[in-house]
Amino acid sequence: MTARRSSPLDGVPLLADLGPIDGASVLVRVDFNVPVEANEPGPCEVVDDFRIRMALPTLEWLVTRGARVTAASHLGRPAKDGRERCSMEPVRRSLAALAPKVVLLENLRFDPGEEANDPAFVDRLVDGFDAYVNEAFGVAHRAHASIVGPPRRLPSAAGIRLAEEVEVLGRLLDEPERPFVAVVGGAKVHDKLGVLHSLADKADVLLIGGAMAFTFFAALGRDVGASLLDEGQIESCRLLLQGHPNIVLPTDVLALEPGGVFGSHAPGVGPRSDTKVVGQELPYGWKGLDIGPDTAEAFAATIAGARTVFWNGPLGANEDERFASGTRRVAEAVADCPGYTMVGGGDSAMVVDTLGLADRIDFVSTGGGASLALIEHGDLPALAALRAAPNAPGVKPRR
């Protein structure tokens, strides 16, 4: 008889482990770091409420059982963008329409103690609460005060969506139906080198695109022109390619000419005459910004034959429409794939939502960075903290 494999959810308390909560005051850490835009002359508004909607089952579970629920989240980077631009007020209005009985605190990152994991900030945060729930998978890889602090002080639990995210990712990586195809895009290699190793070990095929592909080109001795290059990782990429023949790189790229203007709203963006499709060798001064059409079709064909697909990260600089076609083609292929498909949050989730493809994906994660961290490390700070909560399965009651 085969022993059951351990799961990242083992030992993590779930909502039922909170016990009776009628009349209890419950703090729920959510991830409402959603896109907000000014709506002149009116107030700022939430333009994508996906993460808010994904937290509703947990909030409703608590409210219907008599709990007094207070949600807490961060929004943006207040230190960089300013407090006014990072106010939770637009999110509060959006939440009020969906869950009117839930109170939302102001931006957690307005206090430096949040990102510093300051125990004094944790004390202030949990004061007056009887229990804590983590429903913020998108930041479960951050050892911030509101993530790892409350479980040391209060009976705690993983929210419905957080538990589902962990369960789906664990199942995807431990027992995927094969062929298993992973698609990874994004910018610099050093941000994803660990997860690339993990996926290359687990997947039958690992398709690599985005700006990180140019560091792999350099590892093969190619000239990448003016493309983004993570020079400190060239040797790491060379070794990764040597040990993993299942890694597939673009065979052609769409590049911008020297002096060409980038950006969908930039003045001077003209016809496609300032772009051209080239191979893995880029001319001097040209900047690769998307996978080429041959690569897009080859990637789509590989995805079409998969029984399991995991995709994280755009395949090009899709903020400029001229360089969005590769990502769009891959998104369509993932949506069309008859196998089990998962999009690992972040920009990829926004792409499938914008294209109206989300309903055709089996699972769209709420956390890009958290998905990658769980794949790489097999655990997350949020999960480790919950396992140490006083009500966690296997934790001895404190005297």
Image (tube, rainbow, N blue to C red):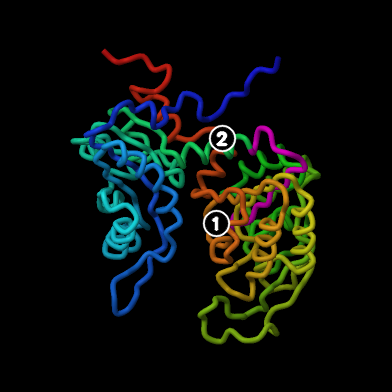
Residue 145 visible from this viewpoint: no
* Residue at x 22%, y 34% (from the top left corner): 23
Nearest to the observer: residue 23 or residue 146: 23
Residue 264 lies within the magenta run: no
**Local secondary structure at mark 2:** helix
Distance between the alpha carbons at the discs numbered 2 and 1: 22 Å
Question: Going by the image, does 66 lie left or right of 60?
Answer: left
| Residue 3 seen in the current view | yes
Amino acid on which the number 2 mark rests in the picture: His
Question: Which is more toward the observer, 350 or 226?
Answer: 350
- Residue corresponding to mark 1: 349
Q: Mark 1 is on which residue type?
A: Ala
Q: Which mark is residue 377?
A: 2
Image quarter where the C terminus lies is top left
The residue at 46%/23% (across/down) is: 11
Would residue 262 appear left or right of 104 to someone viewing this image? right
Which numbered disc, 2 or 1, marks the residue closer to the eye? 1
